[in-house]
Image (tube, coloured by chain):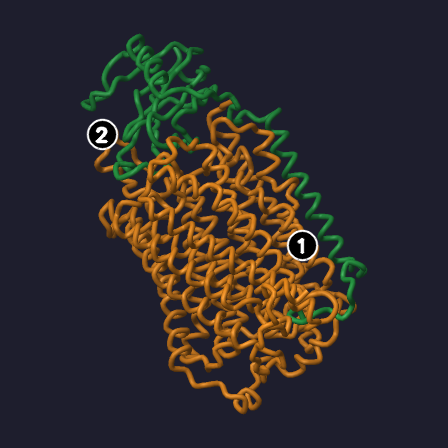
Amino acid sequence: MAIHPPEKRIWWNEPLEKSEITWITIAFIWGLVMFFTMVFWHFTGEQNLSNEAYRIHPETFAERTEAMVDQYTVREEGETGLPVVRPPPGSDVYMLARLWEWWPILELEEGKDYRLHLSSMDWQHGFSLQPENINIQIHPGYELVLTLTPEGVGEYGVVCNEYCGIGHHQMVGKIHVVAAE
Amino acid sequence: MASIAHTGSLPRAAEFRTCPDTGLRVDLAAEKLIRWNAVVAVVFLAIGGLFGLLVALTRWPAVHLLPAEWFYLALTAHGADVLLFWVIFFEIAILYFASAILLNCRLATPRMAWLGFWLMLAGALLANVAVLQGESSVMFTSYVPMQAAPHFYLGLILFAVGALVAVAVFFGTLVIAKDEGTYEGSVPLVTFGAIAAAVIAVFTITSGAIILIPTFLWSIGLISHIDPVMYKVVWWGMGHSSQQINVSAHVAVWYAIAAMVLGAKPLSEKVSRFAFLMYILFLQIAAAHHLLVEPGISSEWKIFNTSYALYLAVLGSLIHGLSVPGAIEAAQRRRGYTKGVFEWLRKAPWGNPAFSGMFLSLVMFGFLGGISGVVLGSEQINLLMHNTMYVPGHFHGTVVAGTTLAFMAITYLVVPLIFRREIMFKKLAQWQPYVFGLGVGGISLFMMGAGTLGVSRRHWDITFADAPVAFDYPGTAFLMMGLNGVFGVLSALGGLMYIVVVVSSVFFGERRTEEKAKAEPLLPQGGAEAVASYGSEGTLKLPGTITLVAIFFVAFVLYYFVNWKFLSEVWPLS
């Protein structure tokens, strides 16, 4: 009984029963399969988070974002006053997170690659692209650079899914995906 | 050697009683500490559970109970009160039980144990005060640079120091037991599991101190900057690893309940102990589970750590997943329930809340918490789930359906054995694990469903009514959150039943005198014989357990690859 000491002193010398060693073997192999699936996906899968990241001052990141907005703004989003920015395919695209908005709104072409730069001006935020359901953590002082290829024309929401204070639930951004020209 | 445990003076003259149910010698000082730690644990479960109900009712879209400010406050309090204070107070009680009581030994330095207790209590109260004052709604995780009031961090630090003292008392007791020869051979398996939990606790609490002390100094202005990524790496060394204390502790509790209710022996001491060793060696690197989509951390680091080094700690759990039901099946077959594949299971003591709670905990921990945890912790799949409702869905499957339900189950043995009171409202107690289990199982499932649809965790308003930019989650997401609310109410009801039964039994239950204990033994007939023999159950034909494990494994494999399929369908990113 498990609440009492074993009589034999050396428990590790016990023989193994067949059913147990079979299960241990299967479970161990399954662990290897799961481990190497992650490695394998880095070579064959199309969804891997970039390892490219830099330390950056929030002001520097804001300046770069503003420069992009100044150059490529095409209109305003409805009555929100937020700029909609349409940078050329293949270019560096910036989106910054701050209390409590994603800025600016992006317009991207379907099937084209973009180098997306993400960082926060203040606290941590969560970049949650919906309804695709891609979720990435955003830190202040860190710039994450990833290559993104939008698929499917339409409007995509960017919800903040890292708690960032009392206005957290108002923090929504947007990405428009349009047909390639 | 005795002086090690008692700073140079003579060993304490401990007072013992002999337990009429088990024949064990019970140190009265240890018994008192177990009682107090358990009582305080239950109080924090009640408080934290109430906050949890408020959270569930607010996230139920049709109810949306609390205003935003109160919601974030309640969510912070819910996390701290149940995830830290309830489970760790209860675990300290388990550590004292698994050392002093199971080893027939006196507890090392009860004074230090009381110091630990009061430090933990003071810390827990201070943190609660800080949260209720409203300036520390930073969530349980308190990610920098968001800042809480200094006494929030101070409360957590005091609590951690107190817990560390208690763990030291546990280790001291092991030394005394060995030294005074209160047991022979190896320690029992349950104690072995408790040792695993305690070793992990040392690592965990140290991580907590390493990060919370500088964060406290930062909150009072003595340190200017805390790096947010570094904070998360170290904080989760506490945050996730402390869940591994829970796993070790509740697996030990499973073995204890199976032994005490059915006289079950482990199939093989070697295998079960080896599985606990896997926990000690590999479970602690789970901090990575929260860092899979962070900038500035390499994929190599993420893959190695998130898999607990080639899934060796998962291997530990998979082993327990066979050996715990296997031990039960073997014990039942020995008692004559040998018909077919599942007679042993059908005729198990389902009316005994200790057993039913334990078995529900085992099944739900495996199917809900375990499988979802491995999937969620796969580096790339985490992109689909990070910070969505899937995350709380997973850990309500582990910590609530697994740990909390197991702790509730063993309470039905602790009250008669340690508090020496009869359980009151026996019918209510019989139903309790089912009501709570069903509620929590529902919470876990529907949260995971909502998360799969993208719903954000820790979010007051998924309609985004006040947001300048509009976005709508799909209708099914709202349905999932509504169902989560319904099952949240059900689990709150199950929690309330537990509190009512336990509190009334402890304070007003009929005293379990020695005569009464002898007339109506709590542990089964023939338990004493089962106790004396050690090792495997002989020919191990366990068709029932093998069937259950096969079903589990197929579900695991299918669900795992389905999620890779989901991943392959989202926007390419690299």
* Picture quadrant where residue A20 is located: bottom right
Residue kind at label 2, given as amino acid type? Pro
SS at circle 2: loop
- Chain B, colour shown: orange
From this viewpoint, which residue is outermost toward the front? B8
Please name the residue shown 37% across and 37% down the image. Answer: B218
Mark 1: few/some/many CA within 10 Å (<14, 14-19, 20+): many
Query: Which quarter of the rendering shows the N terminus of chain B?
Result: bottom right
Q: Is residue B320 above or below residue B383?
A: below
The residue that label 1 is drawn on is B275
Give residue B557's position: percent from left, percent from top. 61, 45
Label 1 amino acid? Answer: Ala
Rendering quarter of residue B468: top left
Return the x and y of residue B368 as percentages of the image width and height: 51, 52
Taking A70 as reference, is B452 above or below it? below
Q: Which residue is mark 2?
A: B468
Is residue B572 left or right of A6 when viewed as pictured? left
User: Mark 1 and 2 residues: CB-CB less than 8 Å, in contact?
Assistant: no
Considering only order in the chain, which callout, 2 or 1, is on the residue closer to the N terminus? 1
Give me the chain that's green: A
